[in-house]
Structures are given as structure tokens and as C-alpha cells.
Image: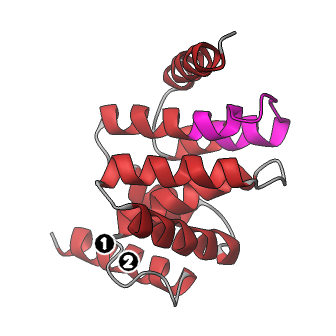
């Protein structure tokens, strides 16, 4: 019991160290998800407004946030991601999600990765790393990518 409590406080402390000015009411899971969404958007070294909008929409839907709260959480995620040396501090929190939540999260990441219509080797590598670190099988990620691709194709009319 003490080990689990210590682990949670240690994770919270490492997230707070990464973002000293992060939104004070952001939960560790919210901040971790925001940082990983930003990481996916920045993986190809192009971080566009449409990707920020996708992140905001994802955060609004996942955490029932207002537009302003989602933007503030995204900003905190941007700061956390920029100050992080690796993604493990974020995946350590995210791996505690239920399996169906992990699938939904991976779909959100794929939506960002595929939003520009191009696949980048850095993005593919990041997706494999995140899946491994949150204990999600490659097959589940591949199926999520296919669903997202189909959804994006139907939205664009092609």
C-alpha cells in the first residue's frame, strides 16, 4: 500500500517538476495525456494550428472541459512536453488507464499523427514507444490507426 502511495506522489512530483507553471487544477492524468498529445503533434517537427485544435477537442471530449480549460491544459502540456527529457513520466501515469481508455487515447494520438495526410517515421516510432510503455499491443494500435484513417477519409470525402 505504501509503495503505491509513494509511487503516485513521486509521479505527481515529477509531473509538477516538469511544469512549474502548469494549470494548478490539472490532474496528473490530464497533464500526462495533454503532454503526450503535444508530443505526437510535434514528432514530425511541424506543430500547426489544426493540430492544436485537434488536441483541444480531444481534451474537451475526454475530460469534459470547456474550450478555455482545454486550451489551458494544452498550454500546460506544451510546457511539460518541452521540459521533459523523455516520455516515460507521462506514460507512467497513462498506463494506469483501463484498456478501452488506452484504445481511445491511441486513436486520439493517431488522429493527430494522420491529420496532415503524411506518415513520418518519427511519428510511427513514437506511436510504437507509447503503446509499449502503456502496455498496449501493436495490433490494437494498428486497428486504431485503420479506424482513424477511415474516419478521416470519410470526413474529407475521399
Please tell me which residue lies in front, 94 or 30: 30
Which image quadrant for residue 81? bottom right
- The residue tagged 1 is 8
Report, in whole angstroms, how far the alpha carbon at label 2 lies from the one at label 1: 6 Å
Q: Residue at x 58, y 51 (%)?
A: 53
Q: Position of residue 139 (x, y in %)?
A: 54, 18
Q: Is residue 2 above or below residue 143?
A: below
- Furthest residue to the top? 158
Circles 2 and 1, Cβ within 8 Å, touching? The answer is: yes
How crowded is the residue under tag 1: few (<14 C-alpha within 10 Å), some, or many (20+)? Answer: some
- Furthest residue to the bottom? 20
- Furthest residue to the front? 157
Which part of the image, by quadrant, shows the N terminus? bottom left
Per the rendering, the mark at residue 12 is 2
The secondary structure type at the circle numbered 1 is helix
| Tag in front: 2 or 1 | 2
- Residue 141 colored in magenta in the image: no
Q: Residue at x 82, y 47 (%)?
A: 44
Which part of the image, by quadrant, shows the C terminus? top right
- Work out whether residue 131 can be spotted: yes
Q: Residue at x 52, y 90 (%)?
A: 20
Left or right: 80, with 73 as reference point: right
Q: Position of residue 122 (x, y in %)?
A: 81, 43
Give the magenta range.
109-127
- Residue 117 colored in magenta in the image: yes
Q: Is residue 22 above or below residue 102?
A: below
Q: Position of residue 157 (x, y in %)?
A: 65, 12
Amino acid at each position: 500500500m505504501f509503495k503505491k502511495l509513494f509511487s503516485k506522489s513521486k509521479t505527481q512530483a515529477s509531473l509538477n517538476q516538469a511544469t512549474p507553471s502548469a494549470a494548478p487544477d490539472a490532474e496528473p492524468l490530464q497533464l500526462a495525456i495533454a503532454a503526450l498529445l503535444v508530443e505526437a503533434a510535434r514528432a514530425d517537427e511541424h506543430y500547426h494550428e489544426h493540430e492544436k485544435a485537434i488536441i483541444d477537442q480531444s481534451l474537451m471530449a475526454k475530460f469534459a472541459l470547456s474550450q478555455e480549460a482545454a486550451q489551458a491544459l494544452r498550454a500546460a502540456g506544451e510546457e511539460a512536453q518541452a521540459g521533459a527529457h523523455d516520455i516515460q513520466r507521462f506514460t507512467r501515469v497513462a498506463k494506469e488507464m483501463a484498456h478501452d481508455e488506452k484504445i481511445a487515447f491511441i486513436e486520439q494520438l493517431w488522429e493527430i499523427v494522420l491529420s496532415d495526410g503524411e506518415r513520418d517515421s518519427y511519428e510511427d516510432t513514437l506511436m510504437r514507444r507509447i503503446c509499449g510503455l502503456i502496455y498496449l499491443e501493436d495490433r490494437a494500435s494498428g486497428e486504431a490507426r485503420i479506424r482513424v484513417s477511415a474516419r478521416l477519409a470519410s470526413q474529407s470525402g475521399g
